[in-house]
Image: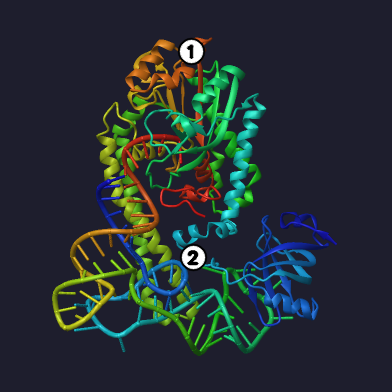
RNA sequence: UCCUCGGUAGCUCAAUGGUAGAGCAUGCGGCUGUUAACCGCAGGGUUGUAAGUUCGAGUCUUACCCGGGGAGCCA
């Protein structure tokens, strides 16, 4: 008898094997029980009848509650009807632990309820799929850099100062040395690493104490930050697009089943190959001002209104039939009503926002930073991530190098993911001239003394260098096609939540 | 910090100012191929908190608490 995982069942058709796991769901039909077993690698329907198992085995099967742990032995059989494609005809079943009444039922739940039970929620198929994709993404990130001669370079989490002097950071007392802060970026340390090792990447958790309450923000998130000596902005952009394409193509290769579980449209991801379109800030502003952008907003508006009307018509028609149909049909109607109400609420919000987006794009003032809606509109032009480069220096960090061809611009670039996911990468060529950097520090009213070590990097053999940061959770959300980063990390830290 | 939406059964949601409901979950009964199984029965409520208007408040008003979405900022 051999113990196997559900993901290995395809190699054991016809064999008698043992599965170990938890009861995901069950259906009982008098003299037959269907047990849906999950083991972390997948789910498998196990069929039990009084003839197939001992009297004790039959009693065991009947006693199982949702999430009870148990082991089953039986013969593996391919079955078209089964989720996952394989079923087991059970010959023996042992209970390990009967679960108390499990709070997360196979029906719908609200986000607060689920977040309070995140330690259990991660057992759900959807969450398992997301976390497995996250794992593949992180492995793809490390492989990409490792295969190209980058050295992993860990930056400290506790730092004595704010990197960019702008964001609000988590603060703590550090013995007799005064305040210390949780890092908001490993970048400055990464620059030191690049001067020592050539090409490095910092990979770790990052903290922001801003009160951002949106689907794109966590207070604790993971960021990977490559930093390369002898790279200019063009090299930086080329690396970023190869990097992102590599991540997406790796997930497509390794996690087809999980993407299917999430209902992700694969064809959208298959487009993600280099080269990515490059748009300068100046061009981006022109695009925002263009008639084409206004038209696209109008088209979206019309499509949203049409969908809204159709959904409401369906709701009305269902309500009219409600009293004449069978009970099972009523349940379908009830479920559909919730679905429609949610979608209509989404559409209503979109319809409220679109006119504002249109206005804001039309009236965008050259020199300002791109807002969230402006970024979204820009991504509508392309079927893959778009790189926006050469932003006004005023809206970017002090350490970014000015464009020699236009001193008002910084050699910065952001990569915006399609489908409204927005900024997943931010990077730049760094200022390598000591005097210019000193000027910037003064302009930004930053304390020079805490940056002395950083200035040393320019004093002792300064070279052109560049780097960028990629937000892991935003990347996971985009690739998975899910609408909130809180589902992309095992235990999300949000402004109103730090437990479990 | 600001804007906006919400809080009704364990869960997801209904309920013109007029007797608080449904589905799921739970318990019991039925059913040998179910796919969020189905059919029947049962138990289950201080409508977020406090005050106010009213003959009467889940519903209207005010304040507060908690949460969702968004702005700013950013990955």
Residue B14 at what x, y percent from top left? Answer: 34, 72
Dot 1 lies on which element?
Answer: helix
Residue A11 at what x, y percent from top left? Answer: 79, 54
Residue A350 at what x, y percent from top left? Answer: 34, 50
Q: Which residue is mark 2?
A: A108
In screen coordinates, is B63 left or right of A460?
left
Q: Is residue A16 above or below residue A404?
A: below
Look at 49% across and 54% down and name the residue there: A499
Look at 52% across and 40% down and name the residue there: A475
The residue closer to the viewer here, A367 or A64, is A64
Look at 54% across and 31% down and name the residue there: A156
In screen coordinates, is A81 left or right of A386?
right
As measured in the structure, the alpha-carbon distance from the residue carrying label 2 to the one carrying label 1 is: 57 Å
Quadrant in the picture for residue A346: bottom left
Q: Which residue is mark 1?
A: A458
Q: Are labels 2 and 1 on one chain? A: yes
Q: Is residue B54 above or below residue A478?
A: below
């Amino acid at each position: 008898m051999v113990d196997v995982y559900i993901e290995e069942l395809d190699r054991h058709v016809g064999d008698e094997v043992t599965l170990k796991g938890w009861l995901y769901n069950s259906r009982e039909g008098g003299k037959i029980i269907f047990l849906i077993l999950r083991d972390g690698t997948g789910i498998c329907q196990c069929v039990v009848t009084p003839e197939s198992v001992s009297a004790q085995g039959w009693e065991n099967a009947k006693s199982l509650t949702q999430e009870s742990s148990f082991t089953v032995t039986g013969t593996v059989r391919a079955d078209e009807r089964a989720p996952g494609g394989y079923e087991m005809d059970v010959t023996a079943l042992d209970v390990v632990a009967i679960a108390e009444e499990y709070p997360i039922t196979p029906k719908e739940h609200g986000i607060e309820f689920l977040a309070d039970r995140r330690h259990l929620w991660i057992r759900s198929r959807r969450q398992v799929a997301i976390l497995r994709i996250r794992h593949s993404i992180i492995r793809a990130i490390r492989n990409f850099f490792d295969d190209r001669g980058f050295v992993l370079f860990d930056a400290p989490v506790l730092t004595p100062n704010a990197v960019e002097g702008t964001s609000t950071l988590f603060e703590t007392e550090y013995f007799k040395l005064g305040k210390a802060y949780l890092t908001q970026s490993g970048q400055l340390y990464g620059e030191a690493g690049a001067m020592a090792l050539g090409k490095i990447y910092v990979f770790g958790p990052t903290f922001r104490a801003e009160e951002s309450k949106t689907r794109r923000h966590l207070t604790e998130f993971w960021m990977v930050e490559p930093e390369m000596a002898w790279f200019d902005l063009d090299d930086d952009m080329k690396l970023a697009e190869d990097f992102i394409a590599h991540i997406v193509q790796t997930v497509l290769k390794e996690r087809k089943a999980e993407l299917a579980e999430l209902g992700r449209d694969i064809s959208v991801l298959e487009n993600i190959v280099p080269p990515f379109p490059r748009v300068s800030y100046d061009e981006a502003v022109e695009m925002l001002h263009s008639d084409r952008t206004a038209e696209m907003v109008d088209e979206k508006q019309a499509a949203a209104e049409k969908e809204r009307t159709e959904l409401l018509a369906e709701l009305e028609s269902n309500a009219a039939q409600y009293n004449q149909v069978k009970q099972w049909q009523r349940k379908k109607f009830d479920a559909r009503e919730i679905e429609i109400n949610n979608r209509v609420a989404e559409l209503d919000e979109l319809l409220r926002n679109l006119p504002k987006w249109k206005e804001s794009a039309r009236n965008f003032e050259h020199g300002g930073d791109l807002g969230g809606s402006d970024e979204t509109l820009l991504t509508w032009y392309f079927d893959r991530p778009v790189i926006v480069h050469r932003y006004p220096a005023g809206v970017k960090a002090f350490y970014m190098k000015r464009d020699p061809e236009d001193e008002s611009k910084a050699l910065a670039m952001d990569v915006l993911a399609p489908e409204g996911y927005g900024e997943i990468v931010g990077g730049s060529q760094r200022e390598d001239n000591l005097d210019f950097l000193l000027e910037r520090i003064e302009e930004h009213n930053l304390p020079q003394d805490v940056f002395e070590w950083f200035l040393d990097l320019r004093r002792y053999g300064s070279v052109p260098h560049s780097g960028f940061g990629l937000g892991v959770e935003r990347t996971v959300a985009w690739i998975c096609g899910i609408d909130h980063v809180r589902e992309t990390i095992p235990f999300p830290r949000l402004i109103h939540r730090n437990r479990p």
